[in-house]
Amino acid sequence: MSKRKSLTDAEGEVREITDADMQSAQSFSQLPQRLQSKLRRLRGPQKAPTKELISIRLPRDVVGRFRAGGPGWQGRMEEALRDWLKHHPH
């Protein structure tokens, strides 16, 4: 069996899928039953929700600066907002 090229690079970016990748792909029903059940598992409702899901549009450069710091960028953005709130009371 030939070694397959990784689908992601060192930064975790997914490369373009080739015809060869598609030829070697398996359908979900062909996967082992144990793997299918793991993939089917859905996350249940939070027991004590502490955050609210919202949609917000931000400038690309702002989001890009946070993402450039790597994993945890959303938490860093949250901390920046909390810091701003401390210094800008109602």
Image (cartoon, grey):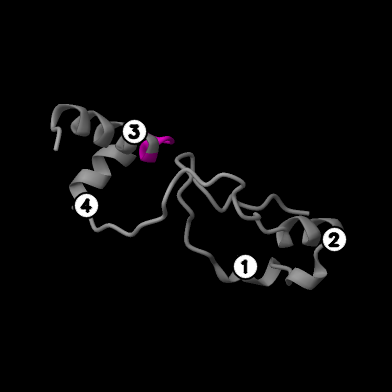
Query: Which numbered tag is attached to residue 76?
Result: 3
Q: Is residue 86 above or below residue 3?
A: above
What is the C-alpha distance between the residues marked 1 and 2?
Answer: 22 Å
Q: Secondary structure at mark 3?
A: helix
**In the rendered image, which residue does mark 1 sit on?**
20
**In the rendered image, which residue does mark 4 sit on?**
60
What is the C-alpha distance between the residues marked 1 and 3?
Answer: 40 Å
**In the rendered image, which residue does mark 2 sit on?**
32
Amino acid type, mark 3: Arg
Give the extent of the magenta segment: 69-74
The answer to whether residue 58 is seen in the rendering is yes
Residue at image position (73%, 53%) is 2
- Quarter holding the N terminus? bottom right
**Mark before the other along the chain sequence, 3 or 2:** 2
Circle 1 or circle 4, nearest the eye: 4
Amino acid type, mark 4: Arg
**Mark before the other along the chain sequence, 1 or 2:** 1
Circle 2 or circle 4, nearest the eye: 4
**Mark before the other along the chain sequence, 1 or 4:** 1
Few, some or many C-alpha atoms within 10 Å of disc 1 (few <14, some 14-19, many ≥20)?
few
Few, some or many C-alpha atoms within 10 Å of disc 2 (few <14, some 14-19, many ≥20)?
few
For the residues bearing labels 1 and 4, Cβ distance under 8 angstroms: no
